[in-house]
Image (tube, rainbow, N blue to C red):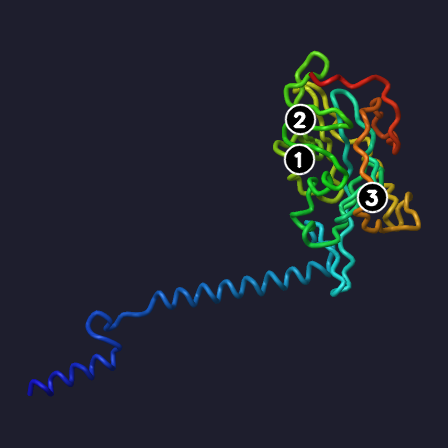
């Protein structure tokens, strides 16, 4: 009788998947893991589809995208105006033909954002990439212009200056190299006293409507894309020149300054 009773208990345990501790219990951990896998998989599918659709529709892009020859996509070609302002005047536009990444200048005070690879596209298309390309040394507390270096606390005339950054007319804290470049941005990198009136727009801003590498633009030339030139020379930015009136065409050469910039202490 005892053996028969034990056999029945074993049979019941086998049909329920275990003894009393597992009887009626559901494997919630397994269900949860399965749900996570399904959700992550669906997210990846949707993200991949949106990225593919975005590549075919430039109007939906919010970050510059690199060329994708396999999809016959030429890549985004965006532009941002920039200016380097020291104490009370703008420096001449940077002159260089170097272009290893597709974020470059045509010596016109414009940053031409045409990423060659995904390594410098999207959120990685920053002012820091441009600065490295053209040999511009800048941080959140220091700016090197020509052979002069200006650090926070150095004098502009009788006042202490500091690194200031204006993006689309608004001061922006932090390292300017981290700025993600957007189409038609206007950027001023300045070293000036806190109470100085720094121009909100660079002198090259009008060039955004007169680009030399955009088909149909009044300033377009026969060449619409600048080829990579990693071995090009990169002369440093010139010394600050006389202030350029708003709306005037900025110089593409480095004229002699009308007066020497304030020396660093």
SS state under label 1: helix
Residue 6 sits in which quadrant? Answer: bottom left
SS state under label 2: strand
Binning the other alpha carbons within 10 Å of mark 2 as few (below 14), some (14 to 19) or many (20 upward) gives many
Residue 142, numbered circle: none
Binning the other alpha carbons within 10 Å of mark 3 as few (below 14), some (14 to 19) or many (20 upward) gives some
Q: Marks 1 and 3: which is nearer the front?
A: 3
Q: CA distance from mark 2 to mark 1?
A: 10 Å
Q: Nearer the viewer, residue 175 or 238?
A: 238
Q: Position of residue 102 (x, y in %)?
A: 77, 49
Tag 2 near tag 1, CB within 8 Å: yes
In the picture of the structure, the residue carrying the numbered disc 1 is: 176
Q: CA distance from mark 1 to mark 3?
A: 24 Å
Instruction: Tell me what residue is drawn at x 52 percent, y 65 percent.
Output: 41
Tag 2 near tag 3, CB within 8 Å: no
Q: Nearer the viewer, residue 241 or 50?
A: 241
Q: Is residue 204 above or below residue 68?
A: above
Binning the other alpha carbons within 10 Å of mark 1 as few (below 14), some (14 to 19) or many (20 upward) gives many
Residue 163, numbered circle: 2
In the picture of the structure, the residue carrying the numbered disc 3 is: 232
Instruction: Tell me what residue is drawn at x 74 percent, y 51 percent.
Output: 115
Instruction: Tell me what residue is drawn at x 88 percent, y 44 percent.
Output: 212
Q: Assign the N terminus to one quadrant of the image.
A: bottom left
Mark 1 vs mark 3: which is more N-terminal? 1
């Amino acid at each position: 009788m005892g053996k028969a009773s034990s056999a029945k208990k074993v049979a019941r345990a086998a049909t329920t998947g275990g003894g009393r501790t597992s009887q009626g219990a559901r494997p919630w951990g397994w269900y949860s893991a399965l749900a996570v896998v399904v959700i992550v998989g669906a997210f990846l599918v949707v993200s991949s589809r949106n990225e593919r659709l975005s590549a075919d529709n430039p109007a939906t892009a919010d970050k510059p995208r690199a060329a994708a020859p396999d999809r016959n996509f030429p890549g985004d070609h965006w532009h941002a105006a920039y200016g380097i302002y020291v104490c009370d005047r703008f420096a001449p536009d940077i002159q260089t033909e170097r272009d290893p990444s597709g974020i470059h200048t045509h010596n016109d005070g414009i940053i031409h954002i045409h990423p060659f690879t995904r390594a410098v596209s999207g959120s990685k298309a920053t002012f820091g990439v441009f600065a490295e390309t053209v040999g511009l040394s800048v941080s959140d507390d220091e700016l090197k212009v020509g052979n002069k270096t200006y650090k926070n606390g150095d004098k502009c005339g009788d006042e202490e200056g500091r690194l200031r950054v204006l993006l689309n007319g608004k001061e922006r804290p932090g390292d300017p190299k981290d700025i993600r470049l957007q189409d038609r941005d206007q950027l001023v990198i300045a070293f000036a006293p806190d109470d100085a009136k720094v121009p909100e727009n660079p002198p090259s801003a009008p060039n955004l409507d007169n680009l030399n590498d955009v088909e149909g633009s009044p300033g377009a030339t026969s060449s619409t894309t600048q080829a990579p030139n990693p071995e090009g020379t990169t002369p440093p930015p010139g010394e600050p020149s006389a202030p350029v009136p708003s709306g005037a065409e900025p110089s593409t050469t480095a004229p002699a300054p009308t007066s020497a910039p304030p020396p660093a202490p």
